[in-house]
Amino acid sequence: MSGVAAGPYSQAIKAAGLVFAAGQIPADSTGKLVSGSIAEKTEQCCKNLKAILEAAGSGIPKVVKVGVFLSDMKHFPEMNGEYEKWFSHKPARTCVAARELPKGVDVEIEAIAVQ
């Protein structure tokens, strides 16, 4: 997990029985960006989300809503292939292309989970 937020915000906030996890980019625990395929980058985002949610007393199986941001929708099929491995329970999801993502990454994923 990329332990420190990249700006003045929390990695996660608990409210009303939910955990709101901030968008996770493909950075490892040292903050180094993961290179490689979109699948590898998506996997790192999901690993980060898993760690943050578990630290907040939740977890991936309790996710009810996901937001995925891609630098280009051409990455959708590859991202989706990796995403499906993590979210087999099929939470509600929005996926959009963003003109630019933090630190120039190709994928960022945020989530809302039940505590």
Image (cartoon, rainbow, N blue to C red):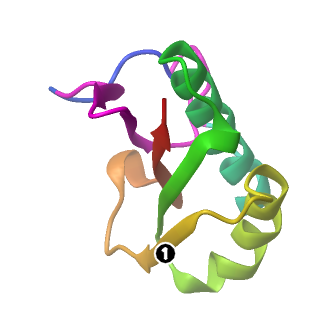
Whether residue 60 is in magenta: the answer is no
> Residue 81, percent across and down?
82, 69
Q: In the drawing, does residue 17 fall left or right of residue 28?
A: left
| Camera-side residue of 47 and 90 | 90
Kind of residue indicated by mark 1: Cys
> Residue 32, percent across and down?
56, 26
Chain part drawn in magenta? 9-33
| Camera-side residue of 8 and 20 | 20
How crowded pointer 1 is (Cα within 10 Å; few <14, some 14-19, many 20+) is rated as some
Whether residue 37 appears in this view of the structure is no
Whether residue 65 appears in this view of the structure is yes
| Camera-side residue of 96 and 55 | 55
Whether residue 11 is in magenta: the answer is yes
Q: In the drawing, does residue 109 fall left or right of residue 1?
A: left
Q: In the drawing, does residue 104 fall left or right of residue 61?
A: left
For residue 27, what is the image quadrant?
top right
**Residue drawn at x 75%, y 59% as measured from the top left:** 89
Q: In the drawing, does residue 100 fall left or right of residue 64?
A: left
Quadrant, the N terminus:
top right
> Residue 2, percent across and down?
51, 23
**Residue drawn at x 55%, y 84% as measured from the top left:** 73
**Residue drawn at x 36%, y 32% as measured from the top left:** 17
Query: Element type at marker 1?
Result: strand
| Camera-side residue of 70 and 88 | 88
User: In the image, is residue 88 above or below residue 41?
Assistant: below
Residue with the mark numbered 1: 95
**Residue drawn at x 70%, y 67% as measured from the top left:** 79
> Residue 7, percent across and down?
21, 29
